[in-house]
Amino acid sequence: MTDRSYVGLWATADGHVRHELLPNGRYDEARGTRESAYQGRYEITGDHIEYWDDTGFTADGDFIDGVLHHGGMVLYRQEAPPGAR
């Protein structure tokens, strides 16, 4: 079960890495100009997130004070642009 309060777009300060956490438990990660660089599923327990990439890669992270810490990166909640998914 996903925590709906974390659903949405998260990005590094420079916008290079972007995670879109979808309400159906899937995610879509963009890197630079490469859209959908990684896709898979995620689960959130409390403030902890586990990722399972469709290729078999796994990762995790933690939401601390409204910021996502994942793989040495810090991602901030973003407002989705009009017309985005």
Image: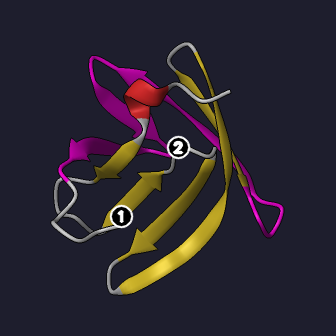
Q: Residue at x 52, y 25 (%)?
A: 3
- Residues shaded magenta: 53-79
* Circle on res. 71: none
Determine crowd level at label 2: few under 14, some 14-19, many 20+ residues with C-alpha closer than 10 A: some
Q: Residue at x 59, y 70 (%)?
A: 38
Determine which quarter of the picture holds residue 12.
bottom left
For label 1, the crowd category at 10 Å Cα-Cα, with few meaning under 14, some 14 to 19 and many 20 or more, is: many
- The kind of residue on which mark 2 rests is Pro
Residue placed furthest toward the bottom: 33
Report helix, strand or loop for mark 2.
loop
- Colouring mode (rainbow / by chain / secondary structure / one colour): secondary structure
* Image spot of residue 34 (x, y percent): 42, 85
Count numbered badges in the picture: 2
The part of the image, by quadrant, that contains residue 18 is bottom left
Q: Earlier in the sequence, mark 2 or mark 1?
A: 1
Q: Residue at x 33, y 86 (%)?
A: 33
On the image, the x and y values in percent for residue 52 come to 74, 51
Closer to us: mark 2 or mark 1?
2
> Observer-nearest residue: 48 or 82?
82
Amino acid type indicated by mark 1? Val
- Say which element carries label 1: strand
Which residue position holds label 1? 17
> Which label sits on residue 23?
2
